[in-house]
Image (spheres, coloured by chain):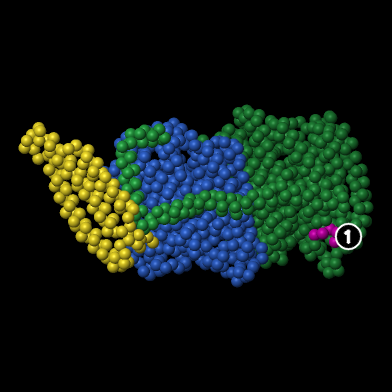
Amino acid sequence: MSLAYLVPLFPLLGFLINGLFRNSLSKSMIGIIGSGVVLASFIISVILFFDVKNNGGAVTQYFNFINVDSFKIPFAFQIDALSSLFLLIITGVGFLIHVYSTSYMHEEPAGHFGRYFSYLNLFVFSMLLLVMGANYVIMFIGWEGVGLCSYLLIGFWFKNDNYNYAAKKAFVMNRIGDLGFLLAVFWILSKLGTANYADVFAQTAKLSATDITGITLLLFVGAMGKSAQIPLYTWLPDAMAGPTPVSALIHAATMVTAGIYMIARSHALYSLSDISQNVVAIVGLATALLAASIALYQNDIKKILAYSTVSQLGFMFLALGVGAYTTGVFHVMTHAFFKALLFLGAGSVIHAMSGEQDITKMGGLRKKLPVTYWTFLFGVLAISGFPFTSGFISKDEILLAVYSYNKVYFWIAAFTAVLTAIYMFRLLMLVFFGGFRGTQEQEHHLHESPPAMTIPLVILGILSLIGGFVQLPASFGGHDYLNEFLGSGMANVPAITNENAAAAIKEYYLLGGTVIGLIIIFAATKKFFAVDKFDSEYTGFKKVLANKWYVDELYDAVIVKPLNSIAGFLKNIFEKSGIDGIVNGVGRFVQYSSRQLRLIQSGQVGSYILFMVLSVVMLFWVFWNQEIIVQFLQKIF
Amino acid sequence: MISLLLILIPFLTGIVSFFLQDEKTAKSWALISSFFTLAIALIGVYTINQKNLLSFDAEWLPQLGSRFTIGLDGMGKMLCLLTAIALPVVFVSTYKNEYQKPGSYFGLMLWMQAGLMGVFLSMDCLLFYFFWELALIPAYFLCSKWGGEKRIAVTFKFFIYTFIGSLLMLVGILYVYFKTPDHSFALQSFYHAGLSVNEQYFAFWLFFIAFAIKMPVFPFHTWQPDTYEQAPTSVTMILSGVMVKMGIFALIRWLLPIFPDAVLKFNHFIILLCIIGILYASLIAIKQNNIKRLVAYSSIAHIGLMCAAVFTNQQVAIQGVMIQMFNHGINIIGLWIVADAIEKQFGTGKFSELGGLAQKAPGLAILLVVMALANIALPLTNAFPGEFLIFNGLFRYNVWMAAIAGISIILAAVYTLNMIQKIFYGNTVAVTENAHDSSMNIKLALVILVIIVIVLGVYPQPMIQLTGGSVHTVLAKINP
Amino acid sequence: MLIQYYIALASALFCIGVVGVLTRSNAIIVFMCIELMLNAVNLLLVAFSKMHFALAQTANAATTAGTDAQLFVFFIMVVAAAEVSVGLAIIVMMYRNVHSADINFLNRLKN
């Protein structure tokens, strides 16, 4: 446990070294430092993991972060089952992505190369802080940190204004979520005076039902932003503007899993509020379905993967919502494997295609990119739930938990799973099968990626296939190792594994899943043959899907534009003529009245004397009626 | 003794500075003086704890019951340190700017520092008023003599506006003075003036309006953007970095303890006003096309937040305000340095005429991004602990107000990122085609600030601790 | 004689003076009206002085009460004489400048 601080420290050092000396270090040096620090963190994470496995978790306090009057927020790390598992995912998958990046980004000039790796390291650092923090405030530090890093990386190619808008959108949408998170933290602090997990969960009895529901819902708002759920999901597909490995990092190892982590971490609170759980489940389900439907008609390879992430995140939230916290975490893990794989594979494809991302212009890459093809295939199989791949086991477990929670949810989720398979196979078919539809020049350049890119792909491919076996259901002779491990830290997990009821369904489901999978492959293949369709515009419902249900346009019309025009009104009219008008008006009134008063000073001696006489008469009158006037004045004031 | 030195050093060196003709000499003289003050301030803040060394008391106007009483308590330490840090940083960053009559320029700057120090140190209300004006008047001359094109009209407005506030406050001070049992201007006599509730309601507004104009909070803010735009940048830095803090500081030191009943009666209204102001200023900032005006409106939003937090009467919030005052000062000075560097180099601060600077001036870009992120209170930058505490206090006071004020967090991200994007990202345009990175002195000043930003962001506790005791004393008057 | 007669007369003279000053525009006449007001006051002073003296004398034959008012009258007359000399000089100067004794021409200070 005493090593815990080293885990985030290494990436921080990497960030500082690569950031400060980016112009003087050679590219290979930068790559070694950038990946090396994450590898070091990974090694320590492994040590910590086994430490936790053998000795249980612990909290280490370093110094007082904020210590005022009634509440104390220490800077402390908590290493337990949940966080150590996430540490492994973050640093492990993160390391592979770093290695991949050394090759993928090699054409960048040295300064930008260093900048890229420093951002990447900072990203990992923030995520580690988020996961390791022993209270909500430290988590919030990482929470905002990953938001910042995503901003920096999405806008990495800052010459392109569209990328900058995407980066800004990501940051702002995240901040909306952050506000919810922050308010939840304030709520906790104002009721309990502490934000330490251990203390908060020990004192849940002090919180009323309203408190718990309020806190959990606000926390979930934070998760919506970070993990791209309805209504704050639109930033994630746009975040594809960043370099492809960054997308892999955002989607697999860091950032979007933060919301899942946070809810899993707070499961002691969520379990106490049925309303919140239901909200989480419904939002997750709706997001899964919506994103899957959008993914059906996208043509940008990264966009499809992005929407699939949104959809898979929806699955995870569904799992959390129905109370299957460990299952949600399990899906995070398997998803990290196959989504990292898919993105890196997509990167490899884009690399080979000289930057082309439109899948309608690809095709038949199977032969030219064999390693990429095979690993990508594994990823597709995993995400579509091909039996005994990692994705199958975790998704199966989610569906099972949902089934025992609510049948309607189950069928919607199952339908979404089918959609997932459809769009993933569509992607696979269009990219790797058929004839090449790009330009001659692109075809000429097609080549398999260098080993620095393919080795991570292979590792991730293997993990995607077998990574699920840690949690293989008992009915297949497996054992819930992960549940066991996490269970020690998640005492409150409801018994979703009531095997008796579930076992029978499982068998059916597995068979059904395989059959459906086959049908889907068939359907997708058919679709792929209808290539000529790409020339014509989508119509009707397809058009709605292709345009992402017009959600971006809706937000633009309902929120962005009105806000802009209000701001414009305030700036140009209200501020200028309103408030400043009043202020200047006072000044102008003084000037005007003095100009008018000046006219009395006519220079006519006669008038002066007249005023003098009148004033004297007035004075006499005042003196004679002194008492009446005083009385009158007293009455007024 | 320390506190007397803090006032005397800038004041006396200021006098000397008026007689210096040569530009180099005047600059070095001012720089040396400000570093000397900084050293004294650091000693005062961190090493000395004996009260008699920190405070000073002498006969001043015995006929009126006013003594020259100054002292350095927790709140004072925080802001004196800010004042002491601000001046050297400002001098360093503007070292290459050229001035007519440099001797007078730096003399006035130093006098302004003396006035600011005095405001934060004085424990006597008449003395406080004296320094309040001493800080204002040099600012007026600096703006009207060395300012931009429209300086005369703008400075006139600034001066009249704040001066009206000052006069109202003077009336208020005299009003309370005549109510004090021992006819004294001393802080303790004012604290125990024993005003009736109705008297408090009346005098409260006299003080509050003065402070509200100074801060400024909505709707008394319109002097600010113009003044910031027209004043010479180093003056703007001091104005926005330090001088506006006088208003908030005065709220905590004078207003809250003297008028506890009035505070409890009006705080709801004032917080509401502040929150309207926060959103209002943030929205306007989004539409700004000029870096200086954007920073000005962002400052109004931040100050509004601090003002709202002061009136929550929460220890947490007010300690948050104290640390936030310091950090906001640091951050906004940093932003002004960048704004000045850009305007000096390209002759314009308009977003629509700039772009792509990150390619040409990466150093400046990184430093600006750090300052801008600190300005939006990203965790691990200095502004986070303060804003965290402020919102926390606001949340305890009223959940909905905290939630609505929290929208400003989002809006702040919008306008700050807008600024970064429009100036630094994108492709270069005509004016930025031949841009070069900023000079060493600007970078040096910014690096100093960035170090403060990071250090206080990671380990804010020593700064937070500083004010615990004195804030507690103040609040004991309100929530006995 | 009753004091009221004196007061009435003095008031009448004073009012004539005031009206004259207000309405006439010839500087000389305005000047004369001012003198008229002064003399109205003088008359009143003398009258009251005599009245006070008479009242006091019945109580104490050797009294000097009221005599100081007469002193004032002389004082005023001296001042008035000085004033006339300066005033007339001003009027003469004015006449030289504008060829008129109309006070409405004396508005040069206006702007």
Q: Residue at x 45, y 68 (%)?
A: B98
Q: On the image, numbered disc 1 is attached to which residue?
A: A535
The answer to whether B450 appears left or right of A336 in the picture is left
- Chain green in the figure, letter: A
| Camera-nearest residue between C30 and A439 | C30
- Chain blue in the figure, letter: B
| Camera-nearest residue between B331 and B401 | B401
Report the amino acid beneath label 1: Asp
Q: Residue at x 21, y 49 (%)?
A: C39
Picture colour for chain C: yellow
Q: Is residue A326 magenta?
A: no
**Residues drawn in magenta:** A357-361
Is residue B294 in view from this perspective? yes
Q: In the displayed structure, would residue A160 be above or below residue C36?
A: below
Label 1 sits on a secondary structure element that is helix
Quarter-of-image position of residue A457: bottom right
Q: Position of residue A284 (x, y in %)?
A: 76, 40
Q: Position of residue A435 (x, y in %)?
A: 91, 62
Is residue B109 in view from this perspective? no
Give the chain letter at badge 1. A
